[in-house]
Amino acid sequence: MDDIRSKVLLTPQQLDRMRASGADVTVTAVHSINPYTGQQSYTGQRIPGAIDTQAYDDYQSPASPERGQRPLPDIDNLQRKARLWGLRRESTIVVYDADRSMTAARAWWVLKWAGLPDVRVLDGGFPAWCAAGLPTTEEETVVEPSNITLSPGHMLELDADGALLLATKGVLLDARIRPNYIGGPVPEGQPRRGHIPHAISAPAPDNVTDYGNFTDAPTLTEMYKALGVEGQTPVGVYCGAGMSAAHTVLALASIGIEAAMYPGSWSQWVFDPSRPVVMGAHPTAR
């Protein structure tokens, strides 16, 4: 199980050893401004050699009612940026953030979706790196551009119809916090609240410990097994706009379970008034 986990998650010590050994590793920092608090994640420090990227600019397209709040990025735009970042197919790409890997997981998913074969997340992110006593720097990284070619579609995806079908034929996990899953009244003109029929509540914050790293494999396995995810039944994940869902896809990958993601998620689902919405703590209306 440790080998499975290390294919998608690296501890600070593992990353440090890889770099010290001369392995071909490209480290990418995923910065963001918290959409709820306005707090900037970037403090002026970075892992030496890390390339700066922006969560809400580089790994998504502009929001639209039809596609949701965070549509997948245009592949040509992403390719142009990946070349400027110096990404190469031969390199192990390690992404990190400063907040429980929420934005790093989105970057991981998008880069894998675009065809990069070896992308991993620094478990615990920049706080874990600092806590381990490893070096940081204010120096910006000078990058040699690459000529990488990207293409979309290398990760399992769901559209709205596929998500609804999977909810009845397999397991569809809702990675939002419980209040958003349960729903409730909204002011006139605001999107409906609730969840996709038959979806099971599985809040993404449960994937991590109080310290911000992903919880151990036996605990993740037991947690998702209790929700019907045992490795045999098809699994899909959605959230509000494709961020927390990527986090849960990553958590499942760390225990050897492949899951599809609905990138449009709830923000796209509720745009169509004909799509059903269930309110309450149960997967189906009662």
Image (cartoon, rainbow, N blue to C red):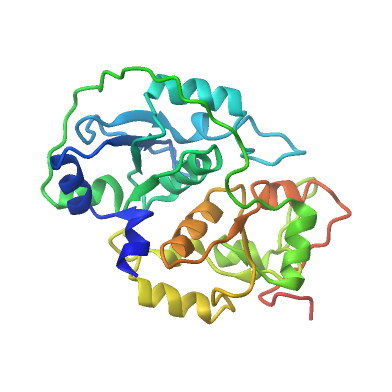
Q: Nearer the viewer, residue 258 or 138?
A: 258
Question: At which x and y percent is residue 249?
Answer: 52, 58
Q: Nearer the viewer, residue 142 or 175?
A: 142
Q: Is 47 displayed left or right of 59 in the figure? A: left
Image quadrant where one finds the N terminus? bottom left
Position of residue 207 measured from the top left corner of the image (x, y, whole percent): 42, 65
Residue at the image point whose x is 33% and y is 66% from the top:
209
Q: Can see residue 191?
A: no
- Whether 236 is drawn above or below 105: the answer is below
Could you say which is closer to the camera, residue 270 or residue 238? 238
Give the position of the C terminus as an image quadrant: bottom right
**Residue 275 position in % (x across, y down):** 84, 56
Residue 189 percent location from the top left of the image: 79, 45
Q: Is residue 52 above or below residue 133?
A: above
Q: Could you tell me if residue 37 is visible in this image? A: yes
Classify residue 197 by image quadrant: bottom right
Q: Residue furthest right?
A: 274
Q: Give the residue displayed 72% in from the left and 39% down from the top.
A: 67
